Amino acid sequence: MGCAIVYKLVQFATISMGQIHFKKGKFDYLDLKNKSDELSSNCSNQNEKLALQFLSKLIKRKEKFSFFTSGSTGKPKQIYFDKKQIIQSAQSTIDVLKLKPNKEHFLICLDVENVAGAMMLARAFCVNANATLLEATSNPLKNISLKHSYTFASFVPLQLQKMLTEDKSAQKKLERFENILVGGSSINSELEKKLATVKTKIWHTYGMTETLSHVALRRVGIETNFTLLPNTKAKLTDENCLMISSPSTKNKWIETNDIVELKGKKLKLLGRKDFVINSGGLKLIPEKIETKIAEIGVTDCSFFISSVTDKLLGEKVVLFIETKKSMNKKVLKTIETGLKKSLSKYELPKEIILKKQFVYTSNGKIDRILSKK
């Protein structure tokens, strides 16, 4: 069913007889047309209340929607959308993943006040799917049956890392899904290897709040580059930053801070313009250095590359490592030796700084600015 038809049906609330499942019960989406206040008494947590509000607005006419950006690279911004944009974005994913009307069962375990969780609700509504809403936790599959009926879910990498580490049956549970989205941040090499062994379609997403969730996908374990969704256009700025235009942006160009390689519909993420380090006149991309460090596996702790001010170089490369335990000189020496083998002298961290705990955003990204303090 095309976007225009779906939008028309949603406008007149004649679509969707699927059900949404809360802790205290379940109800048809269309019950929200006249009973949203009454149904709010069935909510057992804030995520359920926000889901009701979002779905109620989706059914009614001329409603505006707003979401805040993650704030991982600065102060969160509030972005506004209309219902047509929501429906068009939802339908793009439905079409690409070939989600089946009336046959899907969504597991939604992200905060629906954020765009990723809200768009899962919109997709469920548009494809007439049953949806089960859970509170967003680090291990949402913990209390899920091995024989669950869910076909589609979306997780952040941090959730998948926790599941596969803490739950021996996590892989079998994941393999009962037909499609899984992973978004919000990059997937480290260790997690990529684990997910590549899961026998289901797992899709790493590329997108942002401004584009109403993802505008490109790559199959985890099979593809290294992302493929733009149909009707999505891309081009580069003079600094090789990506610009995106799609129906979800009303076909206006959105300039990102992502440095990419672009070939036709394929894009390879290299890093963020915000994070580029200017050291001695050389511009270094932290994410490229991080990939090399992950590949040699010198540390099993979370880490990131950033910089601090240096009188001689302007900025010097620094490796930040998250560890609750102190590292003795021998361990640090081993790390330094491993780094020297795989990094150029310009990429090599001039200092290693240990932090007891990084600051993370709600979608699992390391907040590099706050984590450095």
Image (spheres, helix red, strand yellow):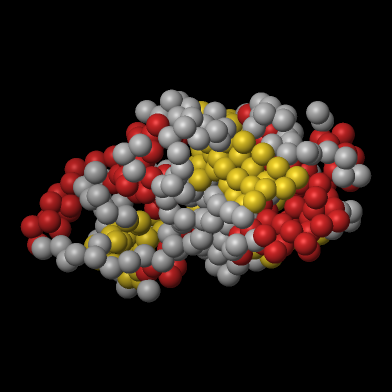
Q: Is 195 above or below relative to 251?
A: above
Which residue is depicted at the point 8% across and 57% down?
Answer: 330
Residue 281: quadrant of the picture: bottom left
Question: 93 or 303, which lies in front?
Answer: 93
Which residue is depicted at the point 32% across and 73% down?
Answer: 311
**Residue 222 rendering spot, x and y as whole percentages:** 45, 26
Residue 305: quadrant of the picture: bottom left
Q: Residue furthest front?
A: 25
Question: 239 or 250, which lies in front?
Answer: 250
Q: In the rendered picture of this protein, how many numbered marks are placed on residues?
A: 0
**Residue 283 rendering spot, x and y as whole percentages:** 42, 54
Q: Is 362 above or below relative to 220?
A: below
As drawn, is 84 to the left or to the right of 69?
right
**Residue 328 rendering spot, x and y as whole percentages:** 11, 63
Question: 307 or 97, which lies in front?
Answer: 97
As drawn, is 172 to the left or to the right of 17?
left
Which residue is depicted at the point 38% across and 45% down?
Answer: 163
Question: 35 or 117, which lies in front?
Answer: 35
**Residue 5 rendering spot, x and y as whole percentages:** 87, 34
* Quadrant where the N terminus is found in the figure: top right
* Quadrant where the C terminus is found in the figure: bottom left
Which residue is depicted at the point 51% across and 60% down?
Answer: 362
